[in-house]
Image: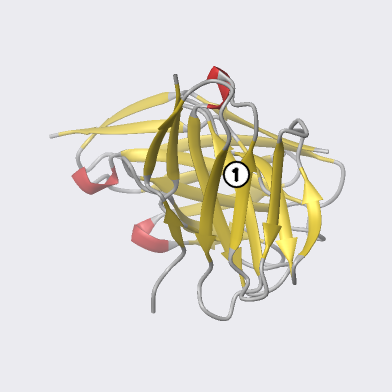
Amino acid sequence: AQSVTQLGSHVSVSEGALVLLRCNYSSSVPPYLFWYVQYPNQGLQLLLKYTTGATLVKGINGFEAEFKKSETSFHLTKPSAHMSDAAEYFCAVSPPVDYKLSFGAGTTVTVRA
Amino acid sequence: DAGVTQSPTHLIKTRGQQVTLRCSPISGHKSVSWYQQVLGQGPQFIFQYYEKEERGRGNFPDRFSARQFPNYSSELNVNALLLGDSALYLCASRPGPQGEAFFGQGTRLTVV
């Protein structure tokens, strides 16, 4: 079984500041890990994913995440926030076999000018 | 190329009614999954279909059913609607049983 915990339902950052979204997971098998972004009234867009290999993963729009097995974490970061980053972000985990995604509750990011 | 398309985009139903939601995957994709996203929560997995066969089912009651057609489009049916079924229903398609999921914009269902 897999589950995801996203720490902090809301994060507010200033434009140009670091964005850090926390995600911890539990999984009975080595997981695949994902971050998705959802803009209002839209579906989910994949930001990045970890399957195997390098633990630091770079995604779209300047985001990156690091898989830390010892900490069961997959935190998402962006060095400098932009107004367009305001959205809801979801961390998800799936077993490699079937890709059935289990999502966290989401973190809403607001960006202050 | 068109992405994942879902119809309708919004609908309102009364408790006890039945509803059918539709999804057309990206051309060439043979796998479709359905997710329910209740307001303020993350999406919950409902069904996965590949090559017209059910490949997985989430923890949802039998009132929820789905099917996939020869052209790989899919329908999600919900019978005896409850107020708690109000949610955004998302469809995702993949080229095969594995790989990156591409999501549609969803169908917003409101049960009154």
Q: Quadrant of residue A13?
A: top left
Q: Do we see residue A100 in this rendering?
A: no
Task: Residue A48 in the image: state x and y as whole percent.
Answer: 51, 59
Task: Residue A52 in the image: state x and y as whole percent.
Answer: 72, 65
Classed neighbour count for the residue bearing mark 1: other residues with Cα under 10 Å, few (<14), some (14–19), many (≥20): many
The residue carrying mark 1 is B35
Answer with left or right where residue A34 lies relative to residue B7.
right
Q: Residue at x 76, y 40 (%)?
A: B58
Q: Nearer the viewer, residue B44 or B68?
A: B68
| Residue extending furthest toward the left | A113
Answer with left or right where residue B41 lies relative to residue A39.
right
| Residue extending furthest toward the right | A28
Please determine whether, in this image, residue B97 is positioned above or below residue A68. below
Please determine whether, in this image, residue B97 is positioned above or below residue B78. below
Q: Residue at x 38, y 31 (%)?
A: A108
Q: Residue at x 58, y 66 (%)?
A: B73
Q: Nearer the viewer, residue A71 or B100?
A: B100
Task: Residue B21 in the image: state x and y as whole percent.
Answer: 53, 48
Answer with left or right where residue A96 lies relative to residue B2.
right
